[in-house]
Image (cartoon, grey):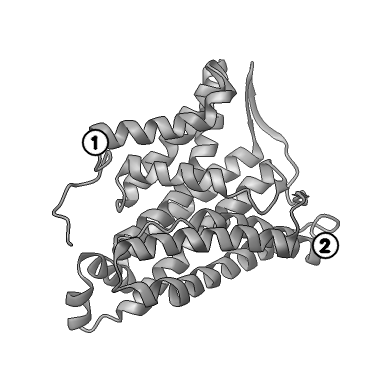
């Protein structure tokens, strides 16, 4: 019974990691860049959600429309910030050596973290209860509440929506073309810059949604909350195969379930360390990830 309860908790956390990991893997697919600032977009989603909820008075006068407004406004704000980061930080370095872009990504991450402390304050804030927790299923010691179910359902919906956009829409086909070759895509009339900006926009939307979903179950939000989830989501993307969307989803779920099982059966002390153990193991024995493919490196 305890194992099943831990499995439910792990799937809930794994869904969050999968949403963040999708942003890493999409950006890597079109730019071959690890956007280390992506975990901080997750933080901004939670912080934006907090301030929008307070401004709209959702805690005092909750309604479906107001809750949806909090989510959509926060996602849109983070999407625009993601586009701005690509336009002003990464695009000028597109022809530069990869190390320059990588160091810029680290710098943007530090800027968002320290800028967040300056603007929002370093003290933690408590996210308003947009939705009150209640049990919807109980069997002996196994409990499933509405927040866990919502996290899984919304994450699954967003993943399927992303898959549909990438595989079935005109912009999705352009994204796949750009991921294959910027030059070839440009020669056939695809607006490469616009496609890359759209990719950052989509990834930031997913990270913001993850930030709000986490805040519903863990209401303490602060400017440094994106560091560890961002690193673990990066590990999930590498585990699944960086650049592979299905791999990011599977890697996120594996990360979440493994982390919760380690906490439940070994010790919570090793919860964070286990993510890096997985990273070392996958880099040693299968660097391309579970679903990734090994290809020639372009220098």
- The residue indicated by pointer 1 is 286
x, y percent for residue 251: 38, 40
Q: Is residue 88 above or below residue 10?
A: below
**Furthest residue to the right?**
60
Q: Quadrant of the N terminus?
A: top right
For mark 2, give the secondary structure.
loop
Instruction: State left or right for residue 264 relative to residue 90.
Output: right
Q: Nearer the viewer, mark 1 or mark 2?
A: 1
- The residue indicated by pointer 2 is 57
1 or 186: which is nearer to us?
186
x, y percent for residue 227: 56, 48
- At horizontal 32% and vertical 68% (from top left) the residue drawn is 172
Q: Quadrant of the C terminus?
A: bottom left
x, y percent for residue 28: 33, 58
Q: Answer with the quarter of the image where residue 165 lies.
A: bottom left
Instruction: State left or right for residue 68 relative to residue 16.
Output: right
């Amino acid at each position: 019974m305890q194992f099943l309860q831990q499995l439910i908790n792990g799937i809930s956390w794994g869904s969050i990691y999968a949403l963040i990991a999708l942003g890493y893997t999409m950006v890597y697919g079109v730019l071959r860049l690890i956007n280390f600032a992506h975990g901080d977009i997750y933080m901004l989603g939670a912080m934006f959600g907090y301030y929008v909820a307070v401004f709209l008075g959702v805690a005092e006068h909750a309604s479906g429309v107001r809750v949806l407004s909090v989510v959509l406004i926060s996602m849109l704000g983070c999407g625009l910030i993601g586009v701005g980061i690509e336009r002003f930080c990464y695009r000028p370095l597109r022809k530069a050596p990869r190390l320059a872009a990588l160091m810029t990504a680290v710098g943007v991450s530090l800027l968002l973290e320290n800028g967040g402390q300056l603007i929002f304050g370093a003290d933690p804030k408590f996210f308003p209860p947009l939705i009150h927790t209640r049990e919807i299923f109980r069997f002996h010691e196994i409990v499933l509440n509405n927040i866990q179910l919502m996290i899984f359902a919304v994450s699954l919906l967003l993943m399927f929506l992303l898959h549909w956009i990438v595989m079935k829409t005109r912009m999705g086909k352009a994204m796949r073309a750009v991921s294959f070759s910027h030059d070839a895509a440009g020669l056939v009339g695809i607006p490469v810059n616009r496609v890359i900006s759209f990719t950052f926009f989509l990834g930031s939307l997913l990270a913001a949604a993850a930030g709000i979903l986490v805040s519903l179950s863990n209401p303490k939000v602060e400017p440094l909350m994106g560091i560890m989830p961002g690193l673990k989501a990066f590990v999930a993307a590498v585990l699944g195969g960086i650049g592979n969307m299905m791999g990011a989803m599977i890697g996120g779920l594996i990360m979440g379930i493994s982390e919760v099982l380690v906490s439940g059966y070994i010790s919570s002390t090793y919860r964070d360390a286990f993510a890096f153990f997985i990273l070392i193991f996958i880099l040693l024995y299968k660097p391309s990830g579970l679903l990734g493919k090994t290809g020639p490196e372009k220098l």
